[in-house]
Amino acid sequence: MNWYVVDKDYIRYLIQFDSRVGYVEYGEKLKLHVGVLLTVKEYHYYVPISSAKPKHRHMSNSLDFQKIQDNDNGYLYAVLNLNNMIPVPDSHITQLKYNQIEQFRSFSNEKEKNDYIYLLQKEMAIIDNLQSILQRKAEKLYEKCLRIPNSSLASRCCNFKLLEEKSKAFIR
């Protein structure tokens, strides 16, 4: 798998229709809307990664949530929130290349940049081992949310069908 960055204008557009779409700007620093790409139906779905927080340690992996955790030492690097996955047209995603990372995020020094790249590499190594699990989860989550739109699961998720419609409209 690869890391992807979603176009800020596209994210701003989607936020108008669904508040669960993650925000990407924090002053001078762009919160890299970094994530992985999965295919659900005919759409590419972008799944954002989030920094691990203390509450995540006590949470279990579920259909809409996946820990990015080192199996050897138990260190929790981050989480993937499948409930916040969004459809993204190819024209509004960019594969993140480590040698171009400063186009998307500012760093105070070279060490901070290198540490961030190292973190992304560690996370991706774990995600690569979860690829088929993540793909199955995304497909199942999508289907459940469409089949039972009033469920508690669907209430935690982006409105996939609405965002697909809005994504098509944005392309035009």
Image (cartoon, rainbow, N blue to C red):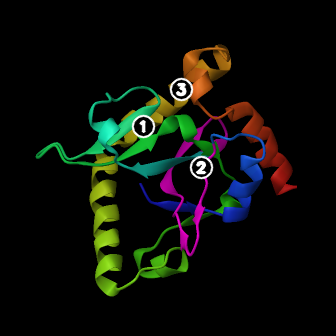
77, above or below 107, in the image: above
Given residues 72 and 116, the one toward you in this image is 116
Give x and y (percent) for residue 166.
Answer: 80, 44
Amino acid residing under circle 2: Gly
Image quadrant holding the C terminus, namely bottom right
Sequence-wise first label, 3 or 1: 1
- Mark pair 3, 2: CA separation: 18 Å
- Mark pair 1, 2: CA separation: 19 Å
164, above or below 112, in the image: above
Residue bearing the label numbered 2: 22
Residue 31 - label? none
Give x and y (percent) for residue 146.
Answer: 67, 21
Mark 1 touches mark 2? (CB < 8 Å) = no
Neighbours of disc 3 within 10 Å: few (<14), some (14-19), many (20+): many
Sequence-wise first label, 3 or 2: 2
As helix, strand or loop, the secondary structure at mark 2 comes to: loop
Residue bearing the label numbered 1: 134
137, above or below 124, in the image: above
Query: Does the image show residue 129?
Result: yes
Q: Quadrant of residue 45?
A: top right
Amino acid residing under circle 1: Leu
Query: Does the image show residue 143?
Result: no
